[in-house]
Image (tube, grey):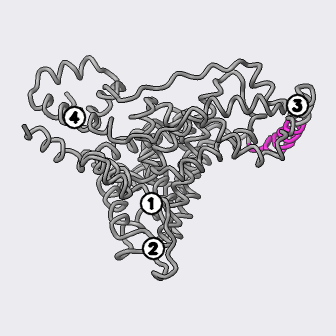
Amino acid sequence: MKHLEDDDLILYLYGEAEDPEEIRRRIEASPELQARCEALRRVLAAVDGALPVPERGEGYGAEVWKRIEPRLGRGRLIPFPSRPFRQAIRWAAAALILLAVGFGLGRLSRPASLPQEARDRILLATVANHLDRSERLLAEVSNSPGPADLAAERAWARDLLNANRLYRQSAHQAGRQRLAGVLDELEPFLLDLAHAPDEPSAEQIEELRERIAAQSLLFKVRVASDRLTDPMKAQKHTL
Amino acid sequence: MEHAEHRTPETPETPEIIERARAGDAEAFRELVESHSPKIFRLVYRITGDEASAEDAVQETFLRAYRSLGRFDARSGFGTWLHRIAVNTALELVRKQQRHRSRHEEMPAGEERPLPSSDPGPDRLALGGEVERAVRSALAGLSPMERTAFILRHFEDRSIAEICDQLGLGVSAGKQAVFRAVKKLRRVLEPLVQRQEVRP
C-alpha cells in the first residue's frame, strides 16, 4: 500500500483526493497520520483569517467605473460588430482557413502517404530533440557555478515551454503516458524558470537546483530522451 | 476543509445586459463593472498583496474585459470569464513588479523609488497579529505562480482542474504549485500554531 505523503493529505483536506474514503480510513487507523493531518489542518486554518481584505464601500463599483470610463473612449463605447457582420467575418475566416488547409494538405499529401511507422518516427525524433534541449537546459542550471544571470536560460525555458505543452498533449493523446508524465513533470520547472527574475538571488537559484535534484528531473528527461532515440541505452539506465 | 470564505456564487447577469454591452451600450457595461468590482477587488488584492496594485489590477481587468467582450462566449458565465481575466492580470502585474524590484534593488540608494510590496507595512504591523504577519511574509516568499495557485485553491475554492485551466498549467504543474505553497506556509506557520496551543 502506498505511503501517504503530505501531498496526499493536502489534496484530501481540500476535498480533491482520488479516494477520500480510503484516506479517511487510513487516517482513522493511524495516530501518526492523524497527527500529521491535524497539523496540516491547523496550519491551513491559521491562514484562513490571516489575510483580511480591506473593506470597499457600497459605491466602490461606481468609483471603478468613473476611473475606467474615460479610458474606454470618451465615455462612449465603440460597438462591437453586429451579429450578421460577425457571422460574415467568421465565414470569410473559415473560407481562408479552408484554403490554407487545402494548400497545406496538398503540400503534405506525399509525406501523408508515408507509413504510420515512419510518421511516428518523425514525431518521436522531434520530441527527442525537445527532450535533448531540455536536458541541456537542466544541466546548465544545475551546473552553473554560484549565483548567475539566468536571462538566457529564462528565454530558453520560455521557448521550450510552449513546445512542451504541445508535446505533452500529443503524447497523452497518443497513449504514451510515460512520456506524457515526464513532460508533465518538466513543465512546472520550465514555467517557473521562464518567469524567474533576470538576476535571481543565490537562494532562488539554489531552489531551482534543489528542485531538479529532488525530482530527479535531469535523470528522467535523459532516460526519456534515450528511450526515444536509443531504446537499448534507456534499458541500461533503468537497470 | 473549512475556509473563512467560500466560493462566491456567480452574479446572475441577464444575457440581455451582456448582449447590450457587447453592442456598445455603455450603461450595460457600467452595470457589469459596478456589480463585479467588489468581488474582483477581493480576488486581486489577495494575489497582489497590496491595495494600490489591487486597484490597478481591477481597472486593468475591466479594460481587458471590455476589449475582449466580442470574444466572450455567452454560454459560459460572465463572472467565470471575468475571474480568469482578473487572475491573469494580477499575476502578470505581480511578475512585472518582481522583475522591476529585482532591477531596482541594484540601483544606487539615491535613485530608489518605493514599490508596492506584499510585505506588511507599518500600519498592518501595528494592527495585525503574529500569525497575520507570518502569513503575509510567507505569501510574499512564494513565487507569483505558487501564490496565485494557493489563493485560488484556498480562498477562492477553485479545484485544481479549474486552477490549471485558468493559469494554463498541466495538472501536475498546478498540483505542485499548490503543494509547494502549502509546504512553505507550513514551514513558517507551524511553530507559531504550536506555540499558540501551548499558551493557556
Q: Same chain for the residues at labels 2 and 3, yes or no?
A: no
Relative to A26, B145 lies left or right = right
Q: Residue at x 87, y 35 (%)?
A: A79
Badge 2 density bin: few <14, some 14–19, many ≥20, Cα 10 Å: few
Query: Which chain is mark 4 on?
Result: A
Q: Which residue is mark 1?
A: A135
Q: Which residue is mark 4?
A: A42
Q: Same chain for the residues at labels 4 and 3, yes or no?
A: yes
Relative to B155, B89 lies left or right = right
Relative to B200, A234 lies left or right = right
Q: CA distance from mark 4 to mark 2?
A: 36 Å
Q: Is residue A102 magenta?
A: yes
| Badge 2 amino acid | Glu
Q: Secondary structure at mark 2?
A: loop
| Badge 3 amino acid | Arg
Query: Which chain is mark 2 on?
Result: B
Q: Which residue is mark 2?
A: B105
Query: Which chain is mark 3 on?
Result: A
Q: CA distance from mark 2 to mark 3?
A: 49 Å
Question: Residue B145 has which mark?
Answer: none
Tell me whether the residue at label 4 lies in contact with that at label 3, contact meaning CB atoms closer than 8 angstroms.
Answer: no
Q: Secondary structure at mark 4?
A: helix
Q: CA distance from mark 2 to mark 1?
A: 32 Å
Relative to B112, A90 lies left or right = right
Q: Secondary structure at mark 1?
A: helix
Q: Position of residue B79 (x, y in %)?
A: 61, 28
Q: CA distance from mark 4 to mark 1?
A: 40 Å
| Badge 4 amino acid | Arg
Q: Same chain for the residues at labels 4 and 2, yes or no?
A: no
Q: Nearer the viewer, residue A216 or B20?
A: B20
Which region shows up in magenta?
A96-111
Q: Which residue is mark 3?
A: A86
